[in-house]
């Protein structure tokens, strides 16, 4: 069967609605206008319109579509039936190329009825079959000559003949509904604008408070850790401040966070990933940007990165991590303002520091002397990316007494130590005793292991500078605060004096204060002759015995094992009774109770230390 669009009688389109039916239309529209006062969601209004038009026409089902401005198609919004069909309707559009039914409704701006929807060529046949439509009435919602929406009415699987009266009633109500929909949209837009304005005002107020707070921190000469903490408090998100080399110099954790969350987007392992590196290259020098997430690169969050830069230089970056709530415009304002304030402060600090002959050397000298304001020293250390709360040691390098070889200059020492220590540039300054080098202990090690690794690094650096073994180096115990450096420097100077007085090795010598222990207090104030006399008085008879080397190794292992016979036997791979026999032999030869007398033990340990200094490890 072929169906053609037949022009409608103009009188039929404008036929008056019967009085009784018009009263029903007005009553139904009254329900709609009453709902406008408490309306919070446009879909609620559309559902009410769908229910009322079904009641007026006497059909089971109705779906309402509204026109999309960008493409003139009609998007499904709500449906009315004995069950909820909103989700299915929202996935549909009407008015496409194959939908001649909808195009006719829009063209005529009048109701169009399909008496047999399954054989009529105008609708989309697959849709009619899927929704089991037998007959359908399409009703336009016309406002000021434009079709803003369409209501589709049907009785599901039941055929129905739609009369001119049905069309007139539905059209009258649909046109009134179009006015209500337009009013609801205007109200919704106004509410959104008011809400947006309120948010903007609130954001401006919060931004002003944040700006005042950050400015106060600078005026009060607070350090970067305190600024980072303030940023985390304002944004309720973790943040980190990195210098130009990517080193993290300060971290802020939001209040109430049980564990310390550290943004890791700029950590070395993460930022070196090709995709992360490419994303970071897109960050402008003066404009904050959001990076991530990139789970495949280990970046599981979004990060707001704000360059800390001035027109002169790029000092570093401020990073705010998305945490518990999404990144917001307020976070962007705080990041931009904080980065600007940090940049100004660092620029001023850098200009002040650059006036000195050697920035890092000046900091090293101030730490060693301990004669500057601690807060000023800490700020300068932060500027250079040096964390004074992280463990460092002082290494003093000196020329071996009696040698004609010159002591390397500070720049050469800096390069040599940086070569063996990787990215960690040391602080180097000249001192009366030689050259002082402040080195960070290797990460993820305890003090003992860290000092041993630092000794090995120092030995490699000295070997590179003086292959013929003309250098000496002492290493202090760890420092973890600015006020600990003067004490550590005095300590390492004692170690160097011991090396200068007693060292008899042919190689570059490196000795730590930990190895000397309390013995450095005695050795630093004694002459070589006095020390030799002490060794003779303490261990003389034993040194003349043919088993002297074996006994010395046993004593050394015994003291390194904290006077444990069992651990000493394990270290030397001998039976425990062998250790006990050798200790008894030492006691017979020296008359000292090395097994249980603390005074005798100290004397023997000091004598062993002198022997080690005089002739290297025995």
Image (spheres, rainbow, N blue to C red):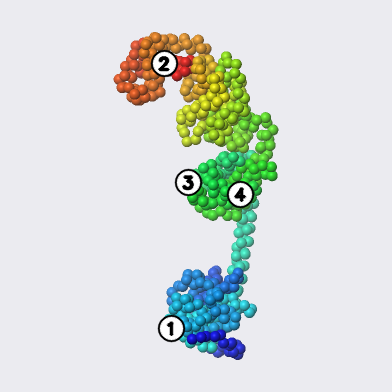
Residue pointed to by mark 1:
158
The CA distance from mark 3 to mark 4 is: 32 Å
Kindly state the secondary structure of the residue where label 3 is placed. loop
Q: Do tag 3 and tag 1 residues touch (Cβ < 8 Å)?
A: no
Alpha carbons under labels 4 and 2: distance apart: 64 Å
Looking at marks 2 and 3 on the same chain, the residue that comes earlier in the sequence is marked by 3
517 left or right of 354?
Answer: left
Using the rendered view, name the quadrant where residue 412 is placed: top right
Q: Which residue is mark 3?
A: 258
Which residue does the image show at 54% across and 20% down from the upper left?
Answer: 468
Say above or below: 249 vs 592.
Answer: below
Q: CA distance from mark 2 to mark 3?
A: 51 Å
Locate residue 113, reporting x and y percent. Answer: 52, 84
Front tag of 1 and 2: 1
From the viewer's side, name the closer residue of 609 and 404. 404
Residue 41, image x, y percentages: 54, 69
> Nearer the observer, disc 3 or disc 1?
1
On the image, the x and y values in percent for residue 243 come to 60, 40
How crowded pointer 3 is (Cα within 10 Å; few <14, some 14-19, many 20+) is rated as few
Mark 1 or mark 4: whose residue is earlier in sequence: 1
Q: Quadrant of the C terminus?
A: top left
Residue under numbered circle 2? 604
Q: Which numbered disc, 3 or 4, marks the residue closer to the eye? A: 4
Give x and y (percent) for residue 251.
55, 42
Secondary element under disc 4, as helix, strand or loop, is loop
> Cα distance, mark 1 to mark 4?
63 Å
Instruction: Kindly report the distance in space between the C-alpha atoms of the residues bearing marks 1 and 2.
Output: 110 Å
**Is 528 rendered above or below residue 106?**
above
Residue annotated with mark 4: 283
- Element marked by disc 1: loop
The Cα–Cα distance between marks 3 and 1, rounded to whole angstroms, is 64 Å
**Do residues under tags 2 and 3 come within 8 Å of each other at their CB atoms?**
no
């Amino acid at each position: 069967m072929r169906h053609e669009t037949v022009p409608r009688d103009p009188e039929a389109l404008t036929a008056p609605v019967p009085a009784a039916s018009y009263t029903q239309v007005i009553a139904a529209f009254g329900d709609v206008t009453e709902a406008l006062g408490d309306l919070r969601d446009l879909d609620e209004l559309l559902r009410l319109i769908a229910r009322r038009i079904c009641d007026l026409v006497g059909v089971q089902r109705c779906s309402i579509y509204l026109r999309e401005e960008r493409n003139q198609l009609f998007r499904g919004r709500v449906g009315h039936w004995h069950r909820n069909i909103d989700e299915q309707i929202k996935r549909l559009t009407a008015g496409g190329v194959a939908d001649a039914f909808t195009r006719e409704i829009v063209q005529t701006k009048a109701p169009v009825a399909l008496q047999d929807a399954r054989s009529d060529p105008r609708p989309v046949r697959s849709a009619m079959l899927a929704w089991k439509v037998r007959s359908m009435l399409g009703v336009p919602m016309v406002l000021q000559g434009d079709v803003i929406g369409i209501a589709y009415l049907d009785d599901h699987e039941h055929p129905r003949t739609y009369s001119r009266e049905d069309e007139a009633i539905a059209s009258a109500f649909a046109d009134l509904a179009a006015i209500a929909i337009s009013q609801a949209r205007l109200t919704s837009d106004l509410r959104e604008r008011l809400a947006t304005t309120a948010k903007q005002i609130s954001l401006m107020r919060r931004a002003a408070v944040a700006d005042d707070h950050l400015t106060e921190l600078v005026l009060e000469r607070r350090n970067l850790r305190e600024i980072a903490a303030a940023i985390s408090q304002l944004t309720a998100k973790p943040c980190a401040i990195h210098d130009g080399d990517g080193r993290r110099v300060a971290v802020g954790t939001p209040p109430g966070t049980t564990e310390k969350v550290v943004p890791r987007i700029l950590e070395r392992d993460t930022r070196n990933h090709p995709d992360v590196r490419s994303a970071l290259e897109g960050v402008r020098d003066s404009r904050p940007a959001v990076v991530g997430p990139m789970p495949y690169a280990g970046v599981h969050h979004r990060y707001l990165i704000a360059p800390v830069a001035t027109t002169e230089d790029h000092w570093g970056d401020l990073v705010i991590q998305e945490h518990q709530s999404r990144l917001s415009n307020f976070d962007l304002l705080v990041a931009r303002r904080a980065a600007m304030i940090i940049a100004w402060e660092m620029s001023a600090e850098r200009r002040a520091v650059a006036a000195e002959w050697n920035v890092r050397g000046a900091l090293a000298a101030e730490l060693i002397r301990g004669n500057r304001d601690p807060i000023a020293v800490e700020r300068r250390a932060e500027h250079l990316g040096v964390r004074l709360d992280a463990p460092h040691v002082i290494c003093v390098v000196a020329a071996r007494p009696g040698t004609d070889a010159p002591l390397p200059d500070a720049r050469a020492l800096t390069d040599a130590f940086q070569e063996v220590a990787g990215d960690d540039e040391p602080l180097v300054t000249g001192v009366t005793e030689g050259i002082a080098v402040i080195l960070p202990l290797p990460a993820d090690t305890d003090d003992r292991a860290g000092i041993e690794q630092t000794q090995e690094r120092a030995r490699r650096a000295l070997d590179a500078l003086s292959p013929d073994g003309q250098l000496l180096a002492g290493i202090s115990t760890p420092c973890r605060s600015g006020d600990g450096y003067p004490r550590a420097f005095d300590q390492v100077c004692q170690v160097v004096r011991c090396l200068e007085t007693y060292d008899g090795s042919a190689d570059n010598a490196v000795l730590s204060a930990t190895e000397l222990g309390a013995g450095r207090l005695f050795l630093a104030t004694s002459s070589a002759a006095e020390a030799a006399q002490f060794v003779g008085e303490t261990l003389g008879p034993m040194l003349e015995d043919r088993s002297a080397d074996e006994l010395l190794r046993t004593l050394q292992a015994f003291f390194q094992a904290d006077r444990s016979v069992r651990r000493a036997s394990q270290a030397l791979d001998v039976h425990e009774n062998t250790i006990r026999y050798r200790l008894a032999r030492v006691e017979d030869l020296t008359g000292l109770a090395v097994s249980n007398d603390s005074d005798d033990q100290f004397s023997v340990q000091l004598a062993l230390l002198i022997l080690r200094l005089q002739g290297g490890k025995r």
